[in-house]
Image (tube, coloured by chain):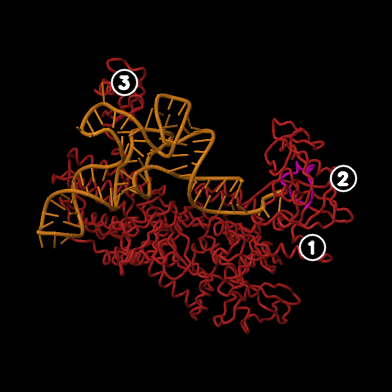
Chain colours: A red, B orange
Amino acid sequence: MSRYNFKENERHWQAAWETAGCFKATEDSSRPKYYVLEMFPYPSGRIHMGHVRNYTLGDVVARFRKAQGFNVLHPMGWDAFGLPAENAAIENKVPPAKWTQENIATMRRQLKSMGLSYDWDRELATCEPDYYKHEQKMFLDFLANGLVYRKESWVNWDPVENTVLANEQVIDGRGWRSGAPVEKRQLSQWFLKITAFAQDLLEGLDGLKRWPERVRIMQENWIGRSEGARIDFRIEGRHDSLSVYTTRPDTLFGAAFCAIAANHPLAHELAADNSGLADFVAECNRMGTSEAAIEAAEKRGFNTGLRAVHPFDPSIDLPVYVANFVLMEYGSGAIFGCPAHDQRDLDFANNYGLRVQPVVAPKDTDAKTVTITDEAFADDGILINSDFLNGLSVADAKAMMIDRLEQMGQGTRAVNYRLRDWGVSRQRYWGCPIPIIHCGDCGAVPVPEDQLPVELPEEVSFDKPGNPLDHHPTWKHVDCPACGKPARRETDTFDTFFESSWYFARFCAAGADEALPRAAVDYWLPVDQYIGGIEHAVLHLLYSRFFTRALKVCGYVGLDEPFAGLMTQGMVCHQTFRDNSGKWMFPGDVTIKGGQARNAKTGAPVTAGRSEKMSKSKRNVVDPEAIIDAYGADTARLFTLSDSPPDRDLEWTDAGVDGAWRYLNRLWRAVSEPNHPLGNAGDAPPAQLGHDANSLIKAVHRTIEGVTGDLERFHFNKAVARIRELTNAAEALAGDAPDCVYARRFALEIIARLIAPMMPHLAEAMWRELGNAPQLIAETDWPAADPAHLVDDTVTIAVQVNGKLRGTIVLPQDASKDEAEGAALALDKVQDILQGGSPKKVIVVPNRIVNVVA
RNA sequence: GCGGGCGUGGUGAAAUUGGUAAACACAAGGGACUUAAAAUCCCUCGGCCGUAGAGCCUUGCCGGUUCAAGUCCGGCCGCCCGCACCA
């Protein structure tokens, strides 16, 4: 009994595909195109199981679509800028560029060992000037088109990474990578006007039918559209007015105060002459933004002494506070507080003894009895104590209030978004330089096009903390392109999400002189199927949608939505182990015998914990290269596909890998050492087919049909199950008669072709063993099911009595209702239950079920 | 708090529009082959009723609709994820 030699086969077939140029993509308007893309990796050093899963999923789609006749584009590249390279430089004294290039070389080799069907000619790395020079130009085009601005603003500062973070990169008040609590700092930053597309980005989600609903909802929430009103309050003794945003203009008669954010311009103005207020503002800025800090923080305010004038009832006293719970970044940074109908306002009012006047009564409640104590009433109801609004519903009252305010010129209908502009400046070295020169006279001057790219200097020092570009002795000193006087280069670099916001478009013509040649981009885009982790639901995926729109404005592309289809894959998990000192242990250092986990070397007992996402910190990782060395790429690929649906978490187990390995060898033996003869390639079908051979052939066609549907819907685990089922059926067919020989060969050839997207090397080996060399499966069309074989002559029908299964009957396909009823009633069991009586009712669903109601 | 998802054997999971629950595997147990082991092959494998049957129960829990509910509706319970002082 021989084992499949995966090492030799995988090397051989990878070379064969390369020689044949199977995966080279070229534009061809005569064929439908299909662009499959997996989120490109950061070259961190080595691939992990998450990569293996991601790229296997993409490869199945790519190979399947290619076999179906699509002109497939399936590229791979490197998201190569980022902080880890700088950290490596600091720790190991390796230049970031060298570190990155070495990692890319390792990971490229690892990916190639997986047998992925990439067009490697299109490989790109975002840290190459040939790549980032184009985005410097894009940035300048955005600037020229009013999509970029520079602003001094309060920003999220990550004290560990020593850089600014975008709002999307702050998770629960902490840096998305460092995990350090984010601080507020005031800095001059470049912003991309993503908010200009807020409504368009929101509406565009409706068209993304092949995106997971979950992701669409997350983006919808992130954009956070709300409808309400902007209301201007006159302030006693001042000429300017205070503009507030509210979603509840209906509650205006219940107003008890106005409050502004600590960073509101009015607060700064007043704080200049008021040290108490200045202290309060400073305290607010120190306050943490994490969930815990917010929950612990009391609703506090500082009474400015100003009075706002109620637009309809001057007798309502509205003191103006600076309050710690009002955000400058949302709405206008100012609110009116209605304590009866907003919990925060109520907490605040209770702290400061402000009036609590209910203006909305719950339906079916006597208006006189409505009292508010500790819990604000925020639901729908009927307006009370509100002059011209009394008796209206909340919705009607909102509309009427806004109409009245507009008539008076004291307010307008307003839509507000939670989304804020994307700050792209990062105070780091290993990123794309922002192509701007700061001149004392001319301000921020774009680097002239003929001086692009602004390349990163290679000789930099990481001895000092902070940005090496800023410390560089010469790099930043240049003359102003406008006036020629000494000036200073921008030393910030782009957020690395800038690079990943357009790489998918660059793949259409990687290496071209032009950034995005329109013919190629128009042919290949949008990406038909994008595959990656859910963690980018509102990061990369939102930025890319915006970026594509901005590129369209500048004439680079002709479409809005870059990704027509999206699949988000689940995590790869593994059991965790700790030794008796509580230290995490690698699975490879643990053996399990008789249910007891032990240290493989010392034999000391080990505590087995729950399964969690593979992570270096918990050491519950399995190195893909070790698996590929021991079992081959096909086994690893099959295992990641066969146990769980792609969007669910995958539990990595040694037993599961063994199972995949056993199946692979079983298939190999089925063609290399068959128990029964298999005939020769191209043998004509026998004139007569016996029953067994015929039913195997039918099963083959059913499997083709089923697997094709499964792959189209990404039900890869089901596709594998079906192919295994067919394998079982093929092996069960004994007999050396010509019809059996023919049916077995037919089944095995189809199995090889159906399994090829999952286990491409084995499939080629089987195909050759079956005598089909030199043809490659990679260049063979997807098998088609013959509809004539999909219907059976007979069908098994379930027979129920009162909804409980009592037996089955076998009838000709499409037998009449009467036939089915007669056959069902004739069953002994049915007769026993009826005991000679006649049924009350018989329901017949043709070809499916008969239910006898006794 | 708001939004979304999930709950099926010992485990991962299947179950087109409501129509034979548990396909396909993993693990476990038993057997064959073997001097032995590995590999391979075969059998059993949701639960209960002592053996047994036209048996009963079973898709988180309770109820409803229906000839028929894992699937639809209402109400609970539990777990997971996203957002969160967003006015």
Q: How many marks?
A: 3
Query: Where's residue A72, x and y in %?
Result: 42, 57
Query: Where's residue A387, x and y in %?
Result: 82, 36
Badge nearest the viewer, 1 or 3: 1
Mark 3: amino acid: Asp
User: For mark 2, what is the residue?
Assistant: A314
Output the chain of dot 1.
A
Output the chain of dot 3.
A
Residue A580 position (above or below residue A299): below
Which of the marked residues, 2 or 3, is nearer the chain's N terminus?
2
Mark 2 surroundings: few (<14), some (14-19) or many (≥20) residues within 10 A: few
Separation of residues labelled 2 and 1 (CA atoms): 27 Å
Magenta highlight on residue A250: yes
Output the chain of dot 2.
A
> What residue is at 69 percent from the left and 69 percent from the top?
A187
- What's drawn in magenta, residue-wise? A244-258
Q: Nearer the viewer, residue A267 or B41?
A: A267
User: For mark 1, what is the residue?
Assistant: A277
Q: Is residue A165 left or right of residue A771?
A: right
Q: Secondary structure at mark 2?
A: loop
Q: Secondary structure at mark 3?
A: helix
Mark 1 surroundings: few (<14), some (14-19) or many (≥20) residues within 10 A: many
Mark 1: amino acid: Leu
Query: Where's residue A367, x and y in %?
Result: 75, 33
Q: Which mark is residue A818?
A: 3
